[in-house]
Amino acid sequence: MWRRLKILSRFELRQTWDEKAILFYTLVAPTIYFVIATVSSGGHPFGLHNVAYQLLGYWAYIVLVGVLNGFQFGLIGMRESNFLKMFTIIAGDKRLIFYSNLAVQIVFIQVEIVVFDVIVLLLNPASLSLVPLMVGGFFMNFLLIPIVSGFTNFILVLPIKLNVVSLMTMGYIFLGMLLINLPFNPDSALGIVLTALNPCSYMIVAYGMLFNLVGSATGLMLGVLGVVALFYLVVGFYPVRHMKLQSYTSRY
C-alpha cells in the first residue's frame, strides 16, 4: 500500500507541476495584490494596525484556492476525462489516488505560503516581528489543509460538469473570503456558525486563537474548533468513497 501511495504521489507531483496555471491563482495573484497594496500605501500594505490578522487572510485564501483548484478541481477533471476510472483500476483503490493527491497539494500549498511570506518580509521589513507567527502557521497548516479539504469534499459527489464546477469554486472562494471580513466575536452565535460552515472563518479563528489575535482562547471556541475539525475529518471524507469514477459528460 505504501509503495503504491509513494508511486502515485510522484505521479501526482508531476501532474501538479505541469498545471502551472494553478500557481497564478494561489501564489501570483495574492502576491500581485500585496505588491500593489505595498506601493499604494507607502510601504504599509497591512495598514498600521492588525498587521498579523490581515496576513492570516492571505494564508486563508492561498489554502482555500489551493485545495479547491489543485485538489478537488483536479480530481473532478480526472473524472470528466475518464482518467480517474482507469487510474483507479491501476491503483486498486481510488482512496489511494485521493490521499496521494492530498499529500502533494499539502506540499505545494506549504511551499507557496513560505514563498509568499518571504516576499512579505522582503517588501515590508516591519513584518520581521511576524516570523514566529509564520513558523507557527506553517506547522499548523499540516492539520488545517486536510480539515479544509473535508469542508469542500462535497463538491466531489455533485453531478455537475467541469465548467459548472469552475464557476462554483470561484463563487465559493469569493463568498468565503467575503464572510471573513464580517466583524464577529468568535464566541458569539454568528462566530460559531461561520466557524462551522466557512473554511476561511475556521482558519482565521484557528490561527487567531493560537496566537491570541482574535481574543483569548476560550474553552467554548476551542471546543468548537475541535468538534468542527473532527466532523470534517470524519464525515467530510465520506464523499471520497462515493465519488463516481465515470464522467457526467462522457460515457466513453
Image (cartoon, helix red, strand yellow):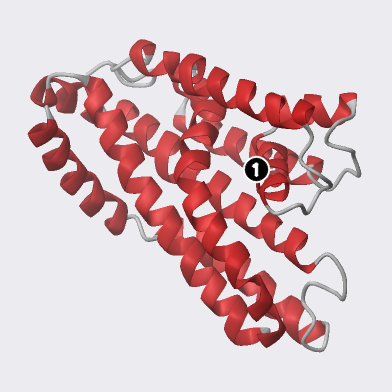
Residue 186, picture quadrant? top right
Q: Position of residue 20 (x, y in %)?
A: 37, 61
Query: Is 48 above or below relative to 132?
Result: below
Identify which residue is drawn at 62% across, 73% down.
32
Residue 84, picture quadrant? top left
Identify which residue is drawn at 65% across, 43% down.
203
Q: Position of residue 97 (x, y in %)?
A: 24, 30
**Given the image, on which type of amino acid does mark 1 rest?**
Met
Judged left or right of residue 19, residue 64 is right
Q: Nearer the viewer, residue 47 or 85?
A: 47
Q: Secondary structure at mark 1?
A: helix
Identify which residue is drawn at 11% across, 27% down.
1
The residue carrying mark 1 is 203
Q: Position of residue 170 (x, y in %)?
A: 62, 42
- Packing grade of label 1 (10 A; few <14, some 14-19, many >=20) is many
Residue 25 in view = no
Q: Position of residue 73 (x, y in %)?
A: 44, 37
